[in-house]
Every structure is written in C-alpha cells, then in structure tokens.
Image (cartoon, rainbow, N blue to C red):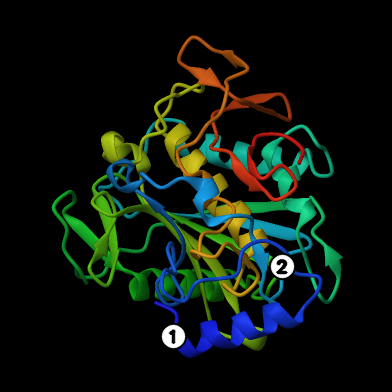
Amino acid sequence: MRKLSAFVVAAVALVACAAAFGDQPSPQDPAGRSGDILGIVPVHSQAGHSGGAGGNLSYHGGPVMHTNATYAIYWLPPGYSLSSNYEGLINQFLTDVAADSSKTSNVYDSDTQYYDGTNGNILYSSAFVQGIVDTSPFPANGCSDSYTSVCLTDGQLQAEIGNVISANGLPHGSGTIYFMFTPRNVGSCFGTSCAYSSFCAYHSHFGSGSTLTLYANMPYAAWVPGACGSGQSPNGDDADSTINVASHEHNETITDLLGNAWYDRRGFEDGDKCAWNFGSSIGSTSTGKYNQLINGHTYYLQQEWSNRSTGCVLTGL
C-alpha cells in the first residue's frame, strides 16, 4: 500500500490546487493499488464495489500519457498454448484502437478529459508498434496458486520484459506501454495476491528516468472464466476476455501511469471504478454480444469512468 505520509502530502497539495476536482483521496482506503501495483482488476467474486461511492477522480499532480505507443509480448515457451486466434485478435485490437485515434466513438475518448500540469489534456492518440513472441523458458516457480502449474512473481515478469526490451532494442520511457501476455495454465502473484483467486490483471512500472518501463500483466483471462471471463465473446475466441482487461489497464496507464495522477478518494482509477460494468450492448455476432465497434471490428469492453458524466461510459465523455 501507499505510505501514509505520501497520501498526506498528496492531500495537502490537492487542497492547495484549485484546478483539482472530485473527492479528496483517502489514505485509509487506497483500494486497487499495492505499492507500485496499480489498477488491479479484481476477480468477479471480489468486485462488489460501486464506482460512484468514491466520487469523481481527483488530480494528484503526476504525469499522464498524452500519446502512447503499445507493444504486445506473448511469453510462449514450447509446450504452452494460446487459443487459435489469441495473438491475432489482441494485435488487431491494439491496431484498431490506434486506427481510431481522435475519434469520439469508443471508450478511449473518455481519457481526453483528464490532464496534467505540464502538457494539458490527454490526446486520444495511440500507436500499436508490434507484437513479439518470446519463447524463452519460464523460470522456476517464484510463487504458487491453486489454478496453475506455473506461477510467476511480478519481479520475474519485470525481468523478462526487460530481457525482451534489451534483446530487441526497444524503447523505455513514459510514452510506451508493454503488455505481457502469458498462456494457459500460467499464473502470477504479487505478495499473497494471485491471478484467478484475487486478480485478473494489473499495470505497474519499474526503472526511472531513461530506464522507466510501463507494463501491464495480462494473465490468460479465459483460463478461469468464472473469475476473469467477460461473459461475451463476439469474436468467438478466448482473446475476447483478455482484450477486456487489456482495455482496462491501457486506459488506466494512460490516465495514471505512475500512480500519482488520476484516482478517486478510495484509490480507484478510471477502469477500477467500472470494472465488470459493461453497459448496454449495441449488437451481436454468432458467438456473442458486443458494445464497441472500433475500426469496424467488434469488442465487448468494460466501461470507463467519466468525471464529466459522473459515471461509467462507453463512448465520448
């Protein structure tokens, strides 16, 4: 959890800042975050909170991502598997989000109402750079959980992301997000919290300055659908459930990349406040409903919080 002193400083700064709005942060209840682990998507059984209870998001002085570039890393050693179109659909989704940059017709436009004190409002300006298949073997289990035979710690995930960046000459910095996707039967933990029993995804960062690295841990959501499944599969593939939580973490990294920008008085970020809240569907395919049409493709995504609407939204503000 955040240290109490850090919250006190943030609260004092917030009172002094006339531009900030929304409820004051509460150091007693920093939900959805544990140290540098941010935007934790809870499993269905632990997702009983009401988004409105924490009020609007407040600005705490940190940076936002005005533009963003995304990379997808698929850590897939020999012997492990993904669904037939898992990689293709996730790459398509990130490509579509980029293709519809600046449009007001999908949930990413909600981010543009948020800002920082350096460069003003967030732009809906995303670029998908590439997907990378990493066939390096998994290290010895650093943790254990009841759902998988392989369990990776957050430190092991960070180390492998760093390895991929170094091996491919990829950039660090506050404008780039690395999504780490792991296959079936692979879990992960930070502390005593583990995928499929406590969480479905989270975002975080490591390094600083020229080595700052933003990333999201993306377990295979459909491995335990009762915990992390989206309930609809418009593309008829396990990737649909992972795409939902990837959208959650993408939006939150944009609006709160270091955990000191936008969150409510309970510590919830824009995605946390609307987790598992999908709103109304706008159509269906032969395999499931969808509520987003992004670059002509169908997706079923959770809503994101809008201060302007004081509620969860799927399009615009």
The residue at which mark 2 appears reads as 64
User: As shown in the figure, which amino acid type bears the numbered disc 1?
Assistant: Lys
Q: Please report the residue visible at 49 percent of the width from the left and 75 percent of the height from the top.
A: 162
The quadrant the N terminus occupies is: bottom left
- Image height check: is 12 above or below 258? below
Residue 220 percent coordinates (x, y): 36, 45
> What residue lies at 59% left-to-right and 57% top-to-bottom?
252
Q: Which sits earlier in the primary sequence, circle 1 or circle 2?
A: 1
Residue 215 visible in the picture? yes
> Which residue is disc 1 drawn over?
3
Estimate the x, y position of residue 310 in percent, counting from the top left: 67, 45
- Locate residue 120, reporting x and y percent: 86, 67
Residue 75, picture quadrant: bottom left
Of residues 4 and 219, the one drawn nearer to the viewer in this rendering? 4
Q: Give residue 238's quadrant in the image.
A: top left
Question: The residue under label 2 is which amino acid type?
Answer: Val
Report the front residue among 17 and 282. Answer: 17
Dot in front, 1 or 2: 1
Which residue is at 68% across, 73% downward?
174
